[in-house]
């Protein structure tokens, strides 16, 4: 790969800026100053340094964000802040995008990557990658709701969901005196507003929704809302695991 291509792909500047950096002696390959921007390197073998800093080459990036409410899961939005607006400049050269969408008011686990094939595999209903959500519901969630979810729920638009697993964590009296339940629900599809529509179909409302797991990958609860970090290789593999 050409040296200038590698550095511009990684966001270190335009080709002409990189040419200048080479001329100024700012670029070294395996410890040797390289003045020619068209110098060929093996990105997996050669050590490239820019201004004394080692350049880490990779084709794909994988980030885990604890998405806050109030921003949208898109790369661009005319009105709202997007999850990509929260991402540091060093990652933007990879043109990352969110793997699937969480609603604007939903929080929790969002994977952001530039690996389109992985994104497709994780989202495809045929691959059955489970997505687990924590939710607070405005009423008591009952055994009959668990049964209905396990059989699939008609959510309108001629569509019945695949079976979903529903688990009640606790039922309690809220500050306003009404009874609420905290639940986990696991679905393997990602229809628009799916969890909210499933509860609406059984006469209940989701008051708060947070994704806690995708495949075998759990939300790192030490991430504050709006924070993100890179996934480890093991975590990237976990993402496609079918058994939670
Ligand atoms: N289901 C919803 O209703 N909203 C989300 O953000 C995710 C799943």
Image (spheres, rainbow, N blue to C red):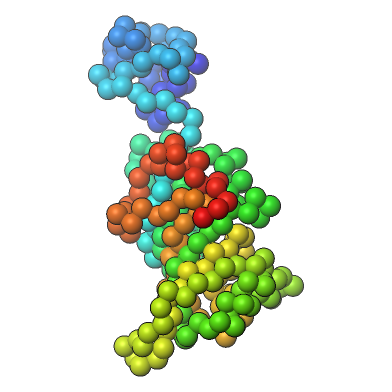
State the residue in front, 110 or 237. 237
Give the quadrant of residue 52. top left
- Name the residue at 40% across, 8% down: 36
Closer to us: 144 or 66: 144
- What residue lies at 68% left-to-right and 52% top-to-bottom? 126
Location of residue 116 in the rendering, given as x and y in whole percent from the top left corner: 57, 41
Position of residue 122 in the picture relative to residue 42 (left or right)? right
Closer-to-camera residue (217/97): 217
- Residue under the image location 39 percent in, 65 percent down: 69
Residue at the image position 41 percent from the left and 88 percent from the top: 179
Q: Position of residue 86 (x, y in %)?
A: 36, 51
Q: Position of residue 112 (x, y in %)?
A: 46, 47
In the displayed structure, would residue 23 be above or below residue 181?
above
| Vertical position of residue 84 compared to residue 165: above or below | above
Tell me, yes or no, if residue 77 can be seen here. Answer: no
Residue 14 drawn above or below residue 82? above
The quarter of the displayed image where residue 196 is located: bottom right
């Amino acid at each position: 790969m050409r040296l200038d291509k590698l550095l511009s792909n990684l966001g270190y500047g335009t080709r002409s800026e990189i040419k200048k950096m080479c001329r100024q002696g700012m670029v070294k390959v395996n410890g040797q100053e390289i003045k020619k921007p068209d110098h060929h390197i093996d990105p997996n073998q050669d050590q490239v340094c820019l201004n004394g800093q080692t350049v880490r080459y990779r084709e794909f990036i994988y980030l885990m964000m604890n998405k806050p409410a109030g921003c949208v899961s898109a790369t661009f939005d005319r009105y709202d802040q997007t999850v990509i607006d929260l991402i540091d400049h060093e990652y933007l050269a990879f043109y990352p995008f969110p793997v699937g969408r969480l609603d604007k008011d939903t929080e929790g686990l969002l994977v952001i990557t530039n690996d389109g094939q992985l994104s497709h595999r994780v989202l495809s209903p045929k691959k059955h990658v489970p997505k687990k959500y924590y939710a607070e519901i405005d009423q008591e969630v009952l055994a009959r709701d668990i049964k209905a979810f396990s059989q699939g729920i008609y959510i309108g638009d001629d569509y019945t969901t695949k079976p979903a697993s529903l688990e009640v964590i606790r039922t309690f009296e809220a500050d306003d005196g009404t009874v609420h339940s905290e639940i986990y629900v696991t679905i393997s599809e990602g229809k628009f507003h799916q969890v909210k529509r499933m509860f609406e179909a059984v006469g209940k409302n989701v008051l708060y929704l947070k994704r806690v797991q995708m495949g075998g990958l759990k939300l790192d609860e030490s991430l504050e809302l709006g924070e993100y970090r890179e996934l480890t290789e093991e975590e990237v593999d976990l993402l496609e695991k079918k058994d939670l």
